[in-house]
Image: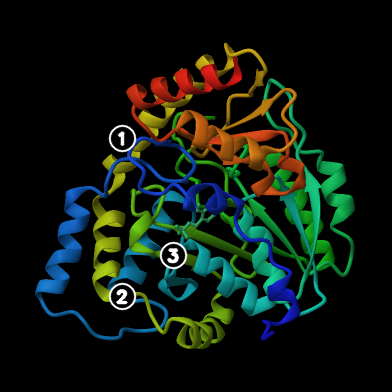
Protein backbone atom coordinates (compact mmCIF):
# COMPACT_ATOMS: atom_id res chain seq x y z
CA UNK A 1 0.00 0.00 0.00
CA UNK A 2 1.28 3.50 -0.80
CA UNK A 3 1.40 5.75 2.24
CA UNK A 4 2.03 9.34 3.33
CA UNK A 5 4.86 10.37 5.70
CA UNK A 6 4.43 9.07 9.26
CA UNK A 7 3.54 12.44 10.88
CA UNK A 8 0.81 12.93 8.28
CA UNK A 9 -0.54 9.42 8.74
CA UNK A 10 -0.64 10.06 12.48
CA UNK A 11 -2.81 13.20 12.13
CA UNK A 12 -6.28 13.03 13.60
CA UNK A 13 -9.04 13.59 11.07
CA UNK A 14 -11.55 16.26 12.12
CA UNK A 15 -14.29 14.67 14.20
CA UNK A 16 -16.53 17.65 13.45
CA UNK A 17 -16.32 16.77 9.78
CA UNK A 18 -16.96 13.14 10.63
CA UNK A 19 -20.31 14.09 12.17
CA UNK A 20 -21.12 16.70 9.53
CA UNK A 21 -20.00 15.03 6.31
CA UNK A 22 -22.57 12.29 6.32
CA UNK A 23 -25.36 14.82 6.75
CA UNK A 24 -24.28 17.99 4.94
CA UNK A 25 -27.10 19.42 2.92
CA UNK A 26 -29.89 17.52 4.67
CA UNK A 27 -32.47 20.30 5.06
CA UNK A 28 -34.02 18.60 8.07
CA UNK A 29 -30.85 18.74 10.12
CA UNK A 30 -30.55 21.81 12.28
CA UNK A 31 -26.79 22.30 12.23
CA UNK A 32 -24.82 24.26 14.83
CA UNK A 33 -21.56 22.34 14.38
CA UNK A 34 -19.68 24.81 12.18
CA UNK A 35 -17.90 27.92 13.46
CA UNK A 36 -19.74 30.39 11.30
CA UNK A 37 -22.72 32.70 11.31
CA UNK A 38 -25.92 31.81 9.49
CA UNK A 39 -25.82 35.29 7.89
CA UNK A 40 -24.05 35.84 4.52
CA UNK A 41 -21.24 38.35 4.00
CA UNK A 42 -22.67 41.92 3.97
CA UNK A 43 -23.47 43.25 0.53
CA UNK A 44 -20.94 46.10 0.44
CA UNK A 45 -18.12 43.61 0.99
CA UNK A 46 -19.45 41.29 -1.72
CA UNK A 47 -19.80 44.24 -4.10
CA UNK A 48 -16.13 45.16 -3.61
CA UNK A 49 -15.17 41.64 -4.71
CA UNK A 50 -17.56 41.74 -7.65
CA UNK A 51 -16.26 45.16 -8.80
CA UNK A 52 -12.70 43.82 -8.75
CA UNK A 53 -13.64 40.85 -10.92
CA UNK A 54 -15.62 43.13 -13.26
CA UNK A 55 -12.53 45.33 -13.61
CA UNK A 56 -10.53 42.30 -14.72
CA UNK A 57 -8.38 41.88 -11.60
CA UNK A 58 -7.80 38.22 -12.31
CA UNK A 59 -4.01 38.06 -12.05
CA UNK A 60 -1.35 37.06 -9.50
CA UNK A 61 -0.46 39.67 -6.91
CA UNK A 62 2.32 40.34 -4.36
CA UNK A 63 3.13 37.46 -1.98
CA UNK A 64 2.43 39.48 1.16
CA UNK A 65 -0.73 41.12 -0.17
CA UNK A 66 -1.58 44.08 -2.41
CA UNK A 67 -0.11 47.32 -1.03
CA UNK A 68 -3.56 48.90 -0.55
CA UNK A 69 -4.69 46.04 1.68
CA UNK A 70 -1.45 45.93 3.68
CA UNK A 71 -1.84 49.68 4.25
CA UNK A 72 -5.52 49.29 5.23
CA UNK A 73 -4.63 46.46 7.61
CA UNK A 74 -1.81 48.44 9.22
CA UNK A 75 -4.24 51.35 9.70
CA UNK A 76 -6.85 49.01 11.20
CA UNK A 77 -4.34 47.50 13.63
CA UNK A 78 -3.08 50.95 14.55
CA UNK A 79 -6.67 51.92 15.36
CA UNK A 80 -7.59 48.80 17.30
CA UNK A 81 -4.24 47.71 18.75
CA UNK A 82 -0.92 49.53 18.45
CA UNK A 83 0.98 51.54 15.83
CA UNK A 84 1.62 49.07 13.01
CA UNK A 85 3.45 49.47 9.68
CA UNK A 86 2.57 47.64 6.44
CA UNK A 87 5.93 45.82 6.55
CA UNK A 88 4.79 44.07 9.74
CA UNK A 89 1.74 42.42 8.16
CA UNK A 90 1.10 39.70 5.59
CA UNK A 91 -2.17 38.64 3.98
CA UNK A 92 -2.81 34.91 3.82
CA UNK A 93 -5.38 32.57 2.31
CA UNK A 94 -7.41 32.37 5.53
CA UNK A 95 -6.55 32.16 9.21
CA UNK A 96 -5.73 28.47 9.00
CA UNK A 97 -3.10 29.22 6.37
CA UNK A 98 -1.69 32.02 8.55
CA UNK A 99 -1.18 29.47 11.33
CA UNK A 100 0.43 26.95 8.98
CA UNK A 101 2.76 29.60 7.55
CA UNK A 102 3.75 30.87 10.99
CA UNK A 103 4.53 27.28 11.94
CA UNK A 104 6.56 26.63 8.79
CA UNK A 105 8.47 29.80 9.53
CA UNK A 106 9.61 28.79 13.00
CA UNK A 107 8.84 25.17 13.93
CA UNK A 108 11.19 22.27 13.21
CA UNK A 109 10.79 18.52 13.57
CA UNK A 110 11.32 17.56 17.21
CA UNK A 111 10.45 21.01 18.58
CA UNK A 112 8.38 21.14 21.74
CA UNK A 113 5.30 23.36 21.58
CA UNK A 114 2.78 24.04 24.32
CA UNK A 115 -0.97 24.58 23.86
CA UNK A 116 -3.82 25.44 26.20
CA UNK A 117 -6.71 23.00 25.61
CA UNK A 118 -9.49 22.13 24.77
CA UNK A 119 -8.61 23.74 21.44
CA UNK A 120 -9.70 23.97 17.82
CA UNK A 121 -8.30 20.78 16.22
CA UNK A 122 -6.43 22.56 13.40
CA UNK A 123 -4.18 24.31 15.90
CA UNK A 124 -3.37 20.99 17.55
CA UNK A 125 -2.54 19.20 14.29
CA UNK A 126 -0.62 21.90 12.37
CA UNK A 127 2.58 21.70 14.48
CA UNK A 128 2.44 17.91 14.21
CA UNK A 129 2.55 18.12 10.39
CA UNK A 130 5.98 19.66 10.86
CA UNK A 131 7.02 16.94 13.29
CA UNK A 132 6.71 18.98 16.48
CA UNK A 133 5.72 17.49 19.84
CA UNK A 134 2.64 19.11 21.34
CA UNK A 135 2.35 19.36 25.13
CA UNK A 136 -1.06 20.41 26.44
CA UNK A 137 -2.16 22.38 29.50
CA UNK A 138 -5.85 21.91 30.30
CA UNK A 139 -8.27 24.68 31.20
CA UNK A 140 -10.46 23.94 34.19
CA UNK A 141 -14.24 24.00 34.00
CA UNK A 142 -16.47 25.57 36.61
CA UNK A 143 -19.98 26.94 36.37
CA UNK A 144 -18.58 30.46 36.69
CA UNK A 145 -16.38 30.02 33.64
CA UNK A 146 -13.30 28.27 32.30
CA UNK A 147 -10.08 28.97 34.21
CA UNK A 148 -6.39 28.76 33.40
CA UNK A 149 -3.96 27.58 36.07
CA UNK A 150 -1.27 30.12 35.18
CA UNK A 151 1.44 28.46 37.26
CA UNK A 152 0.79 25.17 35.52
CA UNK A 153 1.17 26.85 32.11
CA UNK A 154 4.39 28.63 33.11
CA UNK A 155 5.77 25.34 34.46
CA UNK A 156 4.99 23.69 31.12
CA UNK A 157 6.86 26.46 29.27
CA UNK A 158 10.25 24.96 30.10
CA UNK A 159 13.52 26.40 28.77
CA UNK A 160 14.02 24.91 25.31
CA UNK A 161 10.31 25.03 24.46
CA UNK A 162 10.01 26.51 20.97
CA UNK A 163 6.54 28.06 21.06
CA UNK A 164 3.31 28.62 22.92
CA UNK A 165 0.20 28.44 20.71
CA UNK A 166 -2.50 30.38 22.50
CA UNK A 167 -6.00 30.94 21.14
CA UNK A 168 -7.95 33.59 23.05
CA UNK A 169 -10.94 34.00 23.04
CA UNK A 170 -10.75 30.25 22.81
CA UNK A 171 -12.55 27.92 20.47
CA UNK A 172 -14.37 25.91 21.89
CA UNK A 173 -14.67 27.18 25.50
CA UNK A 174 -14.81 30.98 25.06
CA UNK A 175 -12.13 31.27 27.76
CA UNK A 176 -10.19 34.53 27.32
CA UNK A 177 -6.75 35.20 28.76
CA UNK A 178 -6.55 38.16 31.16
CA UNK A 179 -4.14 41.04 30.69
CA UNK A 180 -2.43 40.10 33.93
CA UNK A 181 -1.84 36.53 32.74
CA UNK A 182 -0.64 37.84 29.36
CA UNK A 183 1.98 39.97 31.09
CA UNK A 184 3.23 37.01 33.14
CA UNK A 185 3.32 34.74 30.06
CA UNK A 186 5.14 37.34 27.95
CA UNK A 187 7.74 37.99 30.66
CA UNK A 188 8.31 34.25 31.07
CA UNK A 189 8.59 33.65 27.30
CA UNK A 190 10.99 36.60 26.95
CA UNK A 191 13.17 35.12 29.65
CA UNK A 192 13.39 31.74 27.90
CA UNK A 193 13.28 32.84 24.24
CA UNK A 194 9.94 31.12 23.60
CA UNK A 195 7.78 32.26 20.68
CA UNK A 196 4.15 33.17 21.31
CA UNK A 197 1.76 32.28 18.47
CA UNK A 198 -1.39 34.21 19.36
CA UNK A 199 -4.49 33.08 17.49
CA UNK A 200 -6.67 36.18 17.67
CA UNK A 201 -9.46 34.95 15.37
CA UNK A 202 -12.19 35.91 17.88
CA UNK A 203 -10.61 39.07 19.29
CA UNK A 204 -13.56 41.27 18.21
CA UNK A 205 -16.16 38.85 19.59
CA UNK A 206 -15.66 39.36 23.31
CA UNK A 207 -18.34 39.84 25.97
CA UNK A 208 -16.15 40.88 28.90
CA UNK A 209 -16.09 44.67 28.34
CA UNK A 210 -18.03 47.39 26.52
CA UNK A 211 -15.61 47.68 23.60
CA UNK A 212 -15.98 44.00 22.70
CA UNK A 213 -12.24 43.84 21.98
CA UNK A 214 -10.40 41.09 23.84
CA UNK A 215 -6.91 41.69 25.20
CA UNK A 216 -4.18 40.70 22.72
CA UNK A 217 -0.47 40.09 23.13
CA UNK A 218 -0.03 42.75 20.44
CA UNK A 219 -1.10 45.38 23.01
CA UNK A 220 1.80 44.64 25.33
CA UNK A 221 4.54 43.17 23.12
CA UNK A 222 7.23 45.27 21.44
CA UNK A 223 7.83 45.20 17.68
CA UNK A 224 10.78 42.84 18.10
CA UNK A 225 9.34 40.47 20.67
CA UNK A 226 8.97 36.83 19.68
CA UNK A 227 5.24 37.32 19.14
CA UNK A 228 3.17 36.45 16.06
CA UNK A 229 -0.51 37.16 15.78
CA UNK A 230 -2.63 35.14 13.36
CA UNK A 231 -6.05 36.42 12.38
CA UNK A 232 -8.89 36.03 9.92
CA UNK A 233 -11.62 37.96 8.15
CA UNK A 234 -13.90 34.95 8.65
CA UNK A 235 -15.51 35.66 12.00
CA UNK A 236 -15.60 39.45 12.51
CA UNK A 237 -16.86 40.24 9.01
CA UNK A 238 -18.81 37.04 8.23
CA UNK A 239 -16.39 35.99 5.48
CA UNK A 240 -15.69 32.30 6.16
CA UNK A 241 -16.02 31.26 2.51
CA UNK A 242 -13.67 33.94 1.17
CA UNK A 243 -10.55 32.42 2.79
CA UNK A 244 -8.70 35.57 3.80
CA UNK A 245 -6.53 35.98 6.88
CA UNK A 246 -3.42 37.75 8.09
CA UNK A 247 -0.29 37.57 10.19
CA UNK A 248 1.40 40.28 12.24
CA UNK A 249 5.11 39.45 12.52
CA UNK A 250 8.39 41.13 13.47
CA UNK A 251 9.33 42.98 10.25
CA UNK A 252 12.62 41.07 9.99
CA UNK A 253 10.64 37.86 9.26
CA UNK A 254 8.60 39.30 6.39
CA UNK A 255 11.02 38.44 3.53
CA UNK A 256 11.17 34.78 4.60
CA UNK A 257 7.42 34.74 5.07
CA UNK A 258 7.03 36.04 1.50
CA UNK A 259 9.04 33.04 0.25
CA UNK A 260 6.84 30.62 2.14
CA UNK A 261 3.69 32.23 0.76
CA UNK A 262 5.16 31.97 -2.75
CA UNK A 263 5.63 28.24 -2.30
CA UNK A 264 2.26 27.64 -0.64
CA UNK A 265 -0.38 29.73 -2.41
CA UNK A 266 1.75 32.54 -4.01
CA UNK A 267 -0.88 35.12 -3.01
CA UNK A 268 -4.47 35.56 -1.92
CA UNK A 269 -6.86 36.25 -4.85
CA UNK A 270 -6.98 39.97 -5.63
CA UNK A 271 -10.79 40.21 -5.67
CA UNK A 272 -10.84 38.65 -2.21
CA UNK A 273 -8.25 41.18 -1.03
CA UNK A 274 -10.40 44.03 -2.42
CA UNK A 275 -13.30 42.69 -0.37
CA UNK A 276 -10.94 42.67 2.61
CA UNK A 277 -10.22 46.38 2.17
CA UNK A 278 -13.95 47.15 2.23
CA UNK A 279 -14.31 45.08 5.41
CA UNK A 280 -11.45 46.83 7.21
CA UNK A 281 -12.40 50.34 6.14
CA UNK A 282 -16.20 50.21 6.42
CA UNK A 283 -16.84 47.12 8.50
CA UNK A 284 -17.16 48.43 12.07
CA UNK A 285 -20.99 48.38 11.89
CA UNK A 286 -20.81 44.74 10.76
CA UNK A 287 -18.76 43.83 13.83
CA UNK A 288 -21.07 45.82 16.09
CA UNK A 289 -24.07 44.02 14.63
CA UNK A 290 -22.44 40.59 14.94
CA UNK A 291 -21.33 41.23 18.51
CA UNK A 292 -24.78 42.47 19.57
CA UNK A 293 -26.41 39.45 17.97
CA UNK A 294 -23.95 37.09 19.67
CA UNK A 295 -24.43 38.75 23.06
CA UNK A 296 -28.19 38.22 22.81
CA UNK A 297 -27.82 34.65 21.52
CA UNK A 298 -25.36 33.80 24.29
CA UNK A 299 -27.68 35.16 26.94
CA UNK A 300 -30.63 33.24 25.54
CA UNK A 301 -28.87 29.93 24.84
CA UNK A 302 -26.92 29.65 28.08
CA UNK A 303 -30.12 30.25 30.05
CA UNK A 304 -32.05 27.68 28.03
CA UNK A 305 -29.31 25.06 28.21
CA UNK A 306 -28.78 25.54 31.93
CA UNK A 307 -32.44 24.60 32.39
CA UNK A 308 -32.01 21.18 30.77
CA UNK A 309 -31.32 18.32 33.19
CA UNK A 310 -27.82 16.76 32.72
CA UNK A 311 -26.44 19.91 31.04
CA UNK A 312 -23.72 21.93 32.79
CA UNK A 313 -22.62 25.16 31.17
CA UNK A 314 -20.60 28.29 31.94
CA UNK A 315 -21.28 31.54 30.06
CA UNK A 316 -18.44 31.92 27.51
CA UNK A 317 -16.32 35.07 27.81
CA UNK A 318 -15.82 35.36 24.06
CA UNK A 319 -16.15 33.72 20.61
CA UNK A 320 -19.42 32.12 19.49
CA UNK A 321 -19.69 28.76 21.21
CA UNK A 322 -21.47 27.16 24.11
CA UNK A 323 -19.26 24.29 25.30
CA UNK A 324 -21.39 22.23 27.64
CA UNK A 325 -20.85 19.15 29.74
CA UNK A 326 -23.48 16.47 29.50
CA UNK A 327 -23.57 14.34 32.62
CA UNK A 328 -23.32 10.61 31.92
CA UNK A 329 -22.24 11.06 28.29
CA UNK A 330 -18.89 9.31 27.71
CA UNK A 331 -18.48 9.18 23.93
CA UNK A 332 -19.21 12.59 22.44
CA UNK A 333 -18.58 11.46 18.85
CA UNK A 334 -21.12 8.67 19.14
CA UNK A 335 -23.53 10.98 20.98
CA UNK A 336 -23.33 13.65 18.24
CA UNK A 337 -23.82 11.11 15.48
CA UNK A 338 -26.93 9.84 17.26
CA UNK A 339 -28.20 13.40 17.77
CA UNK A 340 -28.07 13.92 14.02
CA UNK A 341 -29.58 10.56 13.10
CA UNK A 342 -32.34 10.45 15.66
CA UNK A 343 -33.08 14.10 16.43
CA UNK A 344 -31.80 16.01 13.38
CA UNK A 345 -29.66 18.21 15.60
CA UNK A 346 -26.06 18.96 14.55
CA UNK A 347 -23.53 19.70 17.31
CA UNK A 348 -19.74 19.27 17.41
CA UNK A 349 -18.34 16.50 19.64
CA UNK A 350 -16.12 17.70 22.47
CA UNK A 351 -13.57 14.99 21.68
CA UNK A 352 -12.79 16.88 18.46
CA UNK A 353 -11.01 19.44 20.67
CA UNK A 354 -8.71 16.89 22.30
CA UNK A 355 -9.21 14.25 25.00
CA UNK A 356 -9.80 17.07 27.49
CA UNK A 357 -13.01 17.89 25.57
CA UNK A 358 -14.52 14.44 25.97
CA UNK A 359 -17.80 14.59 27.88
CA UNK A 360 -18.68 17.94 26.25
CA UNK A 361 -20.39 19.13 23.07
CA UNK A 362 -19.99 22.46 21.28
CA UNK A 363 -22.85 24.55 19.97
CA UNK A 364 -22.18 27.55 17.70
CA UNK A 365 -24.73 30.21 18.64
CA UNK A 366 -24.25 32.59 15.70
CA UNK A 367 -27.85 31.87 14.74
CA UNK A 368 -31.33 33.37 15.08
CA UNK A 369 -33.23 32.92 18.35
CA UNK A 370 -35.87 30.99 16.44
CA UNK A 371 -33.35 28.41 15.27
CA UNK A 372 -31.70 28.26 18.68
CA UNK A 373 -35.09 27.62 20.29
CA UNK A 374 -35.85 24.75 17.92
CA UNK A 375 -32.38 23.30 18.59
CA UNK A 376 -32.93 23.52 22.35
CA UNK A 377 -36.25 21.69 21.97
CA UNK A 378 -34.51 18.90 20.06
CA UNK A 379 -31.72 18.59 22.63
CA UNK A 380 -34.23 18.54 25.47
CA UNK A 381 -36.07 15.69 23.77
CA UNK A 382 -32.83 13.80 23.13
CA UNK A 383 -31.79 14.02 26.77
CA UNK A 384 -35.23 13.25 28.20
C1 LIG B 1 -9.44 29.43 16.80
C2 LIG B 1 -9.52 29.61 15.33
N1 LIG B 1 -8.50 30.14 14.69
C3 LIG B 1 -8.50 30.34 13.37
C4 LIG B 1 -9.59 29.99 12.62
C5 LIG B 1 -9.43 30.20 11.16
O1 LIG B 1 -10.47 30.55 10.41
P1 LIG B 1 -10.30 30.67 8.83
O2 LIG B 1 -9.41 29.59 8.37
O3 LIG B 1 -11.70 30.54 8.33
O4 LIG B 1 -9.75 32.00 8.56
C6 LIG B 1 -10.72 29.40 13.24
C7 LIG B 1 -11.89 28.96 12.49
O5 LIG B 1 -12.76 28.29 12.96
C8 LIG B 1 -10.66 29.22 14.64
O6 LIG B 1 -11.69 28.69 15.31
Residue found farthest to the left: 54
The mark that comes first in sequence, 1 or 2, is: 2
Q: Cβ(mark 3) to ligand 1 < 8 Å? A: yes
Camera-side mark, 1 or 2: 2
Residue that badge 1 annotates: 289
Q: Residue at x 28, y 67 (%)?
A: 272
The mark that comes first in sequence, 1 or 3, is: 3
Name the spot of residue 45 as percent of width and height, x first. 22, 55
Mark 1: few, some, or many residues within 10 Å (few <14, many ≥20)?
some
Which of the numbered marks, if any, corresponds to residue 353? none
**Disc 1, SS:** helix
Q: Quadrant of the C terminus?
A: top right
In the image, residue 126 above or below residue 206: below
Name the spot of residue 36 as percent of width and height, x first. 41, 45
Question: Taking 140 as reference, is 282 left or right?
Answer: left
Question: Taking 111 as reference, is 200 left or right?
Answer: left
In the image, residue 271 above or below residue 137: below
Q: Residue at x 27, y 46 (%)?
A: 40
CA gap between label 1 and label 3 equals 22 Å
Say whether residue 200 is visible. Answer: no
Closer to the camera, 290 or 328? 328
The mark that comes first in sequence, 3 or 2, is: 3
Residue 297 location, quadrant: top left
**Disc 2, SS:** loop
Residue that badge 2 annotates: 269
CA gap between label 3 and label 2 equals 11 Å
Closer to the camera, 310 or 315? 310
Residue that badge 3 annotates: 94
Amino acid sequence: MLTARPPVRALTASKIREVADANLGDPNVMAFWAGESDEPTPDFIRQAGIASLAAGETFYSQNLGIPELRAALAAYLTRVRRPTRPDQVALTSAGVSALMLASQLLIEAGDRVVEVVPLWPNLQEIPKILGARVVTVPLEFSREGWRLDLERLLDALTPGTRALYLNSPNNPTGWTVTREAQRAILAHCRRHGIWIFADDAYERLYFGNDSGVAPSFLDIAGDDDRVLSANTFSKSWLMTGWRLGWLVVPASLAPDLAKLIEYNTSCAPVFVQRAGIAALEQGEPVIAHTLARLRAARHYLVKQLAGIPRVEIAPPAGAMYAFMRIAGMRDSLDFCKRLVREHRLGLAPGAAFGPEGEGYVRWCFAASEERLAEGVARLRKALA
